[in-house]
Amino acid sequence: MIEKKLFYEIKKSADFHSVVMTTFSFDFHHFEMQVLKQIKQKGITNVNLLVDHKMLDESIGLTTGNLKNLNSSYSVSGMAATGVFHPKMAFFVGEKEIMLIQGSGNITAGGHGKNHELFSVLYATEEDKTQLPLLIEAWNYLKSNTEKIKGFSKDKLNWVEENTTLLKTVNSNKHLFHKISDTVEVSLLYNEKTSIYNQLINLIPKESIKKIKIVSPFYDESGALLLALSNHFDTCTMDVYIQEKKGLHPHKMEKQKNINFYSWDATERAGLEFKKYDRKLHAKLFVFESNEWNYCLIGSPNASLKAFGQESYSGANDEFAVLYKYKEDDILKDISIFNKKQKLAPTKPIDAEAHDELEVDKIKVKKIVILGADKEGNKITLFLQNYDTYKKVKVKLFSNWGIVIEEQTITKLADKMYFEVKSDILNDALYLQFYDENNRIISNKHLLNNVSDLWNTNPSSDNRRLVRLTSMIESGDYKLFEVMEYFNTIHSKSSFSKNTSGTTGYSDDEKKETKNLDYALSYEDAIALDSNSKQHQLILKQHHTIKIWDSFEKYLKEYSRVIEEDNMDDEEEADATTSRDRKDPVYDNKQEYYPSRNVLEKRREIVYKFINNYLKALHNFENYKDKKLGLVDLAMLLIVLKHLFEVTHRKYTIKNETTISDEENYIYNIHGNLSEISSFSGAILNVLGEFINVALQSEWDDPKDEYTLKKIAHYKNISSINSLFSIALIKLNYQGDSRFTDWFDVTAFNILNVFSAPNEGFEKEIENLINESYIKDISNQSINEIIREWITTHNDQQIPPHYFNNENSGICLIRKFIPSQDNPKFLKLSRPGFNYNEKEHDFMNEELFNIENNKWFKSKKSIMQVL
């Protein structure tokens, strides 16, 4: 049989979103370089690893240097056992299919190719559920082993079951044969209340067995398991295959007439040339032959009592195996093991690694057990067990190279506890461990889950779509309308789009359901949440608006770098009199091609819907008291502005149409009715005006962690630059009408009130915006002059006399004094953000503003009483 690449062989049509993998020994670099790459290529986002905690302690440190994905794209949890945690399973889950690969190989280079290993597969789909009871039993086994895992690693495990219907079927049967064909039945064996040995002898009738064949690298030195099997199946002979000078042989066992030992290296399988290196036997295979049914056990247990246990008590190790009952005598024919025999006597071990898991349990058990460790911002959350005897401990944070980068003394431990570390230090921290006052290790090592990054691994269909979208954005491969269609789809699923009353949108029950849907909430649903709720706090960092804008920033940063390098190349290659022609890369993809004008109009409808949904959400902001503006609000504004830059002056071509003039040949034009959103200028005035309304009635979020504080400051600065650039751009295109100029200027002054002036050096960001934009004929110098003039006027508080500044209404244009300009008591005020009055041709507030008490009046009767 040709050797297989374990995960490479998964069929391309498989649609898995999660995997839970178990292993005894673990090689971080092999996993990231080989396994993780293949898993991600299958579309799997939620990756969970369960590793024997003693072996994990040994692996964490110098061996974790240079890792790129640890704790940010997959989680690793240590698993405790009386002996060792020894199963080798890969449980793949999708919405409509499940697969289990289990066997003898650890997640190491040896377990995935260098050693002789043996695996078996179980598989079920919604259409074929024949093997589903077995898979549910295997999943329940995994769940029982992960009950003590806490924190975000536990959340990731819960996601597996939440995103498939196949695992929600109840199956309480254990260790029973399930018929999967006319000639094959399967049972699962694992140590729990009963031992694998006990389960085995209950499933296999002792009288019928004529021959037992065993392949294993490790045995009891006394041959205890071999003797137990021989005594139970007392009418059969036993062939045992061992590898010369490797593994642990039963060399202390007295010679038995019915037990024969043979050389593994003499078998046909061992003789197959796969690689040039000397391959170790690590497969575990137990075959029981009879005249009618044969039985074959494949899995993690070696031929030892620690692995199998006995009739009266369970084995010390956690082990997992699959027992096949079959009629065909050639089910193992392709393995080519038992067709060549050469006797070999057991010998004392000389292999330095011979004792494998049989010796690992000598490692001293730590007193405090860390069950979970999560980092977010500048805070670490810990979940502890067995800490009562310690009144004072030191916690040390280590880098991925095992170097201590932070140390704190803690005087009060609890089941769940928190402590804070500077954000820059925490970013470099990979794991932590507890020490006593004498600097002795008193806990296991525990990796720190990077919660902000691991949220991206949620396997829900919405989040997988988001991950795909953000990946395409970062690579520059996304299409123009994909992001807007994504937001429109999310909005159509939101509670607001389904709520005919048009009020709050969320019932109490619906709010509870948002616990695991933060990334998929529409913008309206997000702002409807209680600002003090746990959901709201999660949204601050996990909402899809933030992820999408961060992806745009990553791409734009790389794009700017390429432009800068290209410009430097121009300077270096040009001589004093000439310069080479260079095509601006912005224009490479300016053209959109549509089969018909109907398709073009549908694309424009996507833009209108996208902007309209955003404006409605901003308008609904006034329904909620004590709302605070934060990352979600800023990210959403930036995404809207970004897409207005992208659609404006982007050319289109319609098949078989050749008569369109250049001026009409745009998806979105910069000119248009300023009261509507069907042009760039109108959309900018309406969007920024409505955002100013929201900002005037809200406070800025004041997060406690340094990470979020810095991120909000960055977002506000970028929002200021993008907004001012947009307004300056339309001001350049609408010169000569003082009414328009007033609208642009008052909007700019309000933006400066809301965001503050941009940081020094904003001119570089303006240059990047011009390079990235599709809008033609932009003068960098003119744009910067307009923005500098706004900033100077605003800073010097030199706004014109016909402007009125009020805390509740912002800076407005005075359109009328009542009763007169010499003795005003009321003002008629205007600015973008107020409703557009067709009669006045202005963005007018319908109410009059009372100068004396700073209140708005709608009633004419009330006004007359004042007058």
Image (spheres, rainbow, N blue to C red):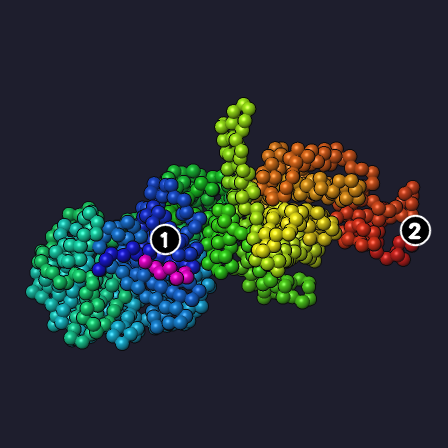
- Count of labels in the image: 2
Using residue 413 as the reference point, say whether residue 326 is left or right of it: left
Using residue 677 as the reference point, say whether residue 650 is left or right of it: left
Q: Residue at x 17, y 54 (%)?
A: 272
Kind of element beneath mark 1: helix
Give the label, 2 or 1, closer to the camera.
1
Q: What main secondary structure does the magenta stretch of the protein show?
A: loop
- Looking at the image, the residue that sits furthest to the top is 576
Quarter residue 728 falls in: top right
Pinpoint residue 792: horizontal percent, then vertical percent: 72, 33
294 vs 40, nearest the viewer: 40
Quarter residue 756 falls in: top right
Pinpoint residue 204: horizontal percent, then vertical percent: 21, 72
Give the amino acid at mark 1: Gln
Q: Upstream in the sequence, badge 2 or badge 1?
A: 1
Kind of element beneath mark 2: loop
Q: Which mark is residue 461?
A: none
- Does the magenta-highlighted stretch encompass residue 13? yes
- Determine which residue is flagged by label 1: 38
Q: Which residues are magenta?
A: 9-16
- Determine which residue is flagged by label 2: 867
Q: CA distance from mark 2 to mark 1?
A: 78 Å
Is residue 535 visible to the viewer in this orientation of the structure? no
Figure quadrant of the N terminus: bottom left
Pinpoint residue 774: horizontal percent, then vertical percent: 60, 44
Give the amino acid at mark 2: Leu
Pinpoint residue 765: horizontal percent, then vertical percent: 60, 37
Q: Is residue 205 above or below residue 570?
A: below
Q: Residue at x 40, y 47 (%)?
A: 70
- Within-10-Å neighbours for mark 2: few <14, some 14–19, many 20+: few
- Does the magenta-highlighted stretch encompass residue 46? no
